[in-house]
Image (cartoon, rainbow, N blue to C red):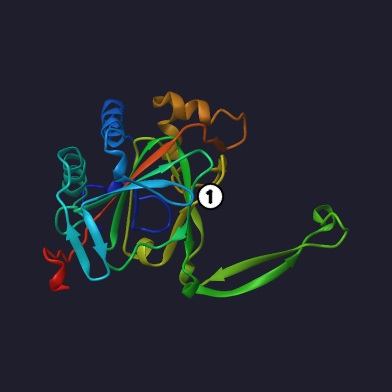
Amino acid sequence: MEGKFNNFVVGDVPTLMYIPNFVTVDEENQLLNNIYEAPVSKWKSLKNRRLQNWGGVVHEKGLLPQELPSWLTKITRRIYEESELFPSAINHVLINEYHPNQGIMPHQDGPAYFPVVAILSLGSPAVMDFTPHSKLRFGSNTLKGDAENRRCDGRDFKIETHEWIDNHHPFSVLLMPRSLLIFKDNAYSDYLHGIKDSVTQQHAGAVNETQGMMHQELNEKADQAMRTGDLKVIHRTTTRISLTCRLVLKVHRNLFKF
């Protein structure tokens, strides 16, 4: 893998990188100020979150572009230049706002994007789960619950477990405030990614748990959210903002040229 972020690869998938403290506290606050100073009309409300779309309208055939504001151009240019993973400048950003009990269902980014995504996390920590695409499912096994794990009616419950081809397996990533997550190639095409709709999330076994916890003390809000004794659990008590930065290769200046 090329680029300056080689030393930040985490987990068994070689195309996933986690960069802690990519922005400073002051930069985080300035980004949040800019986001919340945007016109109310810029927000679009969805079922379980709201978002801002910057850079234009993404169509299946490409992008109808709008110029990014200077404050977004500054951070996307830095990601582009330091990662060396995009063939040209990032031209599209989705800003998602998640309240403590909100997440996003497992999904893959659409074919209009170049297969690299950079996600900058602000505010509350969260855990992102990666699940192999169903096309990589080899089979499933059904296991019966033991005597200590029976249903309330006395019958055994059943647990379905999956086997995956080519050493694929589910994993999770701990997203601490101000961190940058980048994934590409196999991590982009072979996996779905999502965040559970839960106020509490376990981060035990996260592929970047060591890197994430090393910087826990640098963020007071995150530190308070994760004080759970010996349990490796996040209590999401504040809002999380994510900036999903991507590149649309096909740019159309005129709708009628589609």
Name the quadrant containing residue 23: top left
Badge 1 density bin: few <14, some 14–19, many ≥20, Cα 10 Å: some
Q: Which residue is mark 1?
A: 196
Q: Secondary structure at mark 1?
A: loop
Identify the residue at image location x=62%, y=35%: 231
Q: Position of residue 203 (x, y in %)?
A: 53, 43
Left or right of residue 216, residue 181 in this image? left
Does the rendering let one see residue 113? no
Q: Amino acid at mark 1?
A: Lys
Q: Position of residue 35 (x, y in %)?
A: 29, 36
**Vertical comparison of 126 with 89: above or below:** above
Q: Position of residue 137 (x, y in %)?
A: 53, 73
Q: Position of residue 41 (x, y in %)?
A: 30, 43
- Judged from this view, the residue extending furthest toward the front is 41
Does the rendering let one see residue 241? yes
Quadrant occupied by the N terminus: bottom left
Left or right of residue 1, residue 158 in this image? right
Give the number of marks: 1
